Image (spheres, helix red, strand yellow):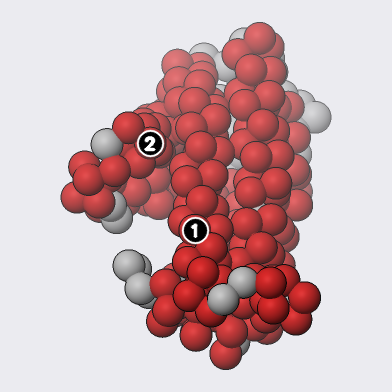
Amino acid sequence: MHHLPSDVGRREFRLAGLCYLAIIALGLWSELGVRGQLVVAGDAAATAQRIAAHPQLWRLGLAADLLMQVLDLPVIVMLWRLLRPVNEALALTATGLNLVQTAVLVANRVQLLASLELLTGPTIGAAFPPGQREALAMLAVQLHGQGFGIGLIFFGCACVIRGALIAASGVLPRVLGGLLVLAGLAYLLNSFALLLAPDVAKLLFPAVLLPAFVGELLFALWLTLGRRRNA
């Protein structure tokens, strides 16, 4: 059994856990509280009307998304320091995958700005007839969802690697490692279904992401509240 590195302290665990909990909360709010309220599946006109009527809410959701990616960084650093003594190559691989995911998601947020600009920007809005503008805005929203799924492929792989290292080494409770592996597999299943079999993805969602939500939530809570094992 590996012990926690001496330079990874309780305060770092708590900080990383709080950042992780904030990421979960911000993600739920932006997805369910903003896009879930403004985007009407299959109805470009209704979606356009709602976004145009609540541009500031749309922008707040985007800001929450970007803050999530900022908060990712302390978590990534702490997990790298934690798992480096277990297997440096795999820990570095997981770190790289997580950073790729973060970069993909940050770039992907431009789609949300594009949809808002199409609907509220005076210059771009005047260049397209209303129906075409609404269709393009809806396309941008849908592409954002596809880009999010692409980013989660990298994060899913990172979760599987980290979970396997935790479960095999015992640096944290092994059950947390198993939960992270399940979370990663859930992300991978959802993302590949979204890209390769959209009709299947519709049947799987949102139940397929329940293991990811439970696993990450429990992991974040343990980082925040759990006791560190003595070396």
Q: List the residue tagged with mark 1.
A: 139
Q: List the residue tagged with mark 2.
A: 195
x%, y% of residue 58?
61, 76
Is any part of residue 53 visible from this angle? yes
SS for tag 1?
helix
x%, y% of residue 164?
45, 21
Residue for point 48% across, 66% down? 135
SS for tag 2?
helix
Residue 61's disc is none
Q: The C terminus appears in which quarter of the rendering?
A: top right
Residue for point 25% across, 51% down? 202
Q: Is residue 68 left or right of residue 225?
A: right
x%, y% of residue 194?
35, 41
Taking depth in this image into account, of 207 and 50 the one nearest to the observer is: 50
Q: Is residue 3 above or below residue 73?
A: above
Is any part of residue 33 visible from this angle? no
Taking depth in this image into account, of 79 and 30 the one nearest to the observer is: 30
x%, y% of residue 174?
42, 28
- Is mark 1 in CB contact (under 8 Å) with mark 2? no
Give the image quarter of residue 167: top left
Q: Is residue 2 left or right of residue 45?
A: right
Amino acid at the residue labelled 1: Leu
Residue for point 62% across, 72% down? 128
Instruction: Mark 1: give few (<14), some (14-19) or many (20+) Cα within 10 Å.
Output: some
Measure the C-alpha gap from mark 1 to mark 2.
16 Å
Q: Is residue 126 above or below residue 178?
A: below
Taking depth in this image into account, of 24 and 12 the one nearest to the observer is: 24
Amino acid at the residue labelled 2: Leu
Q: Is residue 36 left or right of residue 96?
A: left
